[in-house]
């Protein structure tokens, strides 16, 4: 067990759900409450993790290789960024964390769940987020938003069925951890979602 003086919040959801949009607002909001707010992301968050992210988003690979690289980056992220920040009392916000592996690698890619559990147990141990905000949108809305946005990476280029599986896996995961994972209907206007986030943050 590590000493947890700070707080750890993660943002989850399929590509186009609005994580980046809300991350910026959430950071500003939390800076009013915490002396130090650390913003990070997965895969990535460390120099090595960002190199792994580049490989993960660009190179075709076996689904187990993908899972192993995701968890390798996560191990480094926990050691270098998340755990030290929580220990010194900071508020850590990560754009994606372990729930994304469950959704994308198990749900999307069909990775064996026992293998995922073993990797999760090995890597995360007891460092689960205090709060996970799951931005939930239909695939049609997400794809419409992304199309207007930018060039798509290896995950974003997947077919619709892939994202349906990812979304469903995220929702299953939320049902397993109802106290930790808050499902946010992210099809509503940004301002309405922010009002809900404000109340959610106030309650932790
Ligand atoms: N609630 C919302 N209503 C309308 N458009 C949104 C909403 N949330 C995000 N967007 C837009 O959708 C696109 C994808 O959002 P983004 O925050 O980048 O998603 P993610 O980081 O989850 O992939 C952006 O162009 C953003 O401005
Ligand atoms: Mg984003």
Image: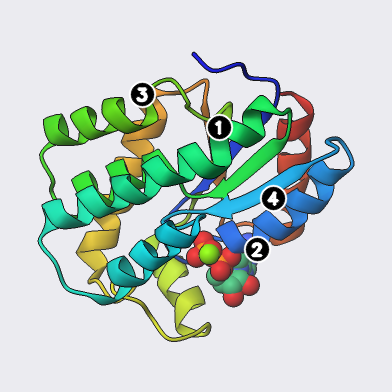
Closer to us: 82 or 160: 82
Precedes in sequence: disc 4 or disc 2: 2
At horizontal 14% and vertical 67% (from top left) the residue drawn is 61
| Residue wearing tag 4 | 193
Q: CA distance from mark 1 to mark 3?
A: 24 Å
Answer left or right for 195 relative to 189.
Answer: right
Precedes in sequence: disc 4 or disc 1: 1
34 is higher (above) or lower (below) than 106 = above
Instruction: Give residue 63's position: percent from left, percent from top.
Output: 13, 56
Q: Nearer the viewer, mark 1 or mark 3?
A: 1
Precedes in sequence: disc 1 or disc 3: 1
Q: CA distance from mark 2 to mark 3?
A: 26 Å
Write down the quadrant of residue 140 in the picture.
bottom left
Closer to us: 142 or 155: 155
Instruction: Give residue 130's position: percent from left, percent from top.
Output: 58, 26
Quarter occupied by the C terminus: top right
**Which label is found at residue 83?**
1
Judged from the image, the secondary structure of the residue bearing numbered disc 4 is: helix
Badge 4 crowding class, 10 Å Cα cut-off, few under 14, some 14 to 19, many 20 or more, is: some
Answer left or right for 25 relative to 39.
Answer: right
Closer to us: 43 or 88: 88
Ligand 1 contact, mark 2 (Cβ < 8 Å) = yes
Q: Nearer the viewer, mark 4 or mark 1?
A: 1
């Amino acid at each position: 067990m590590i000493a947890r003086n700070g707080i750890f919040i993660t943002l989850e959801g399929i590509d186009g759900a609005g994580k980046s949009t809300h991350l910026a607002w959430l950071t500003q909001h939390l800076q009013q409450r915490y002396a130090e707010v650390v913003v990070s992301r997965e895969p990535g968050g460390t120099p090595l993790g960002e190199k792994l992210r580049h490989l993960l988003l660009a190179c075709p690979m076996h689904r187990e290789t993908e899972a192993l690289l995701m968890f390798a980056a996560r191990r480094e992220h926990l050691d270098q960024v998340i755990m030290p920040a929580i220990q010194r009392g900071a508020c850590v916000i990560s754009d994606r964390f372990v729930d994304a592996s469950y959704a994308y690698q198990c749900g999307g890619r069909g990775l064996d769940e026992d293998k995922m559990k073993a990797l999760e147990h090995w890597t995360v141990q007891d460092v689960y987020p205090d709060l996970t905000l799951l931005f939930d949108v239909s695939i049609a809305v997400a794809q419409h938003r992304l199309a207007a946005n930018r060039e798509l990476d290896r995950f974003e280029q997947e077919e619709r069925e892939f994202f349906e599986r990812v979304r469903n896996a995220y929702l299953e995961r939320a049902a397993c951890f109802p106290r930790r994972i808050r499902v946010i209907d992210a099809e509503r206007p940004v301002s309405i979602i922010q009002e809900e986030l404000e109340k959610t943050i106030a309650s932790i």
